[in-house]
Amino acid sequence: MYVNKQTFNSHPEKTNTEKEMQSYLFLEKIGVDYIRAEHDEAATIELCEEVEKVIDAKICKNLLLCNRQQTKFYMLLIPGDMPFKTKYLSAQIKSSRLSFASGEQMEKLLNVSPGSLTVLSLMFDKEENIELLIEKNVFKDEYFACHPCVNSATVKFLTSDLKDKILPALNRKYTVVDLECPDDEV
């Protein structure tokens, strides 16, 4: 996979999509300094490993989940290297039978395609249909990295900016969840 070894600290003059440019302009408008890396499409966390080396930060895994009736939707931010078991999450949010939302639902609700889901796509959730869940270990790292609504670029910024600038600007409350596997199940 190709990853440009040069990083940038501002938006490019031109992007492939409007939503990518909106992501950069949003960060700049609210005063978030970021590092941007360009690369081939990286739709899985495994493909993001080469990008992580260039930006020197772990990329967050972003999952769009829904309840059985598909009436409640959740965006889960989880460390990229953490396994995800729905039973731990279901119990904490009191929602049985969680499943992954479809690509069509992701496009409709957040204007992004599978592999491009990011906390920044919440800017397109004007009706606030998505409940944000953040695994507690996401806050342990100094930096937070994610796609800017397309999976051919990655941005890195301070995790404190996620909490103190980005989520308030998106008017988002969130629930912290603990998805660490108990010792007896390792």
Image (cartoon, grey):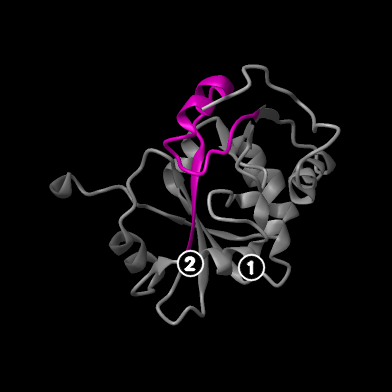
Q: Could you say whether the residue bearing mark 2 is in a helix, strand or loop?
A: loop
Q: Which residues are magenta?
A: 38-65
Q: Alpha-carbon neighbours of circle 1 within 10 Å: few (<14), some, or many (≥20)?
A: some
- Frontmost residue, 143 versus 3: 3
Q: Is residue 112 above or below residue 29?
A: below
- Frontmost residue, 35 versus 44: 44
Q: Position of residue 86 (x, y in %)?
A: 33, 61
Question: Is 57 a magenta residue?
Answer: yes
Q: Is residue 99 left or right of residue 152?
A: left
Residue 101's disc number = 2
Q: Position of residue 81 (x, y in %)?
A: 38, 38
Residue 109's disc number = 1
Q: Are marks 1 and 2 in contact (CB under 8 Å)?
A: yes
Q: Could you say whether the residue bearing mark 1 is in a helix, strand or loop?
A: helix
Q: Is residue 21 left or right of residue 128?
A: right
Q: Amino acid at mark 2?
A: Ala
Residue at image position (39%, 74%) is 95
Residue at image position (66%, 48%) is 149
Q: Position of residue 79 (x, y in %)?
A: 43, 41
Question: Is 53 a magenta residue?
Answer: yes
Q: Quadrant of residue 156?
A: top right
Residue 121's disc number = none
- Frontmost residue, 70 versus 32: 70
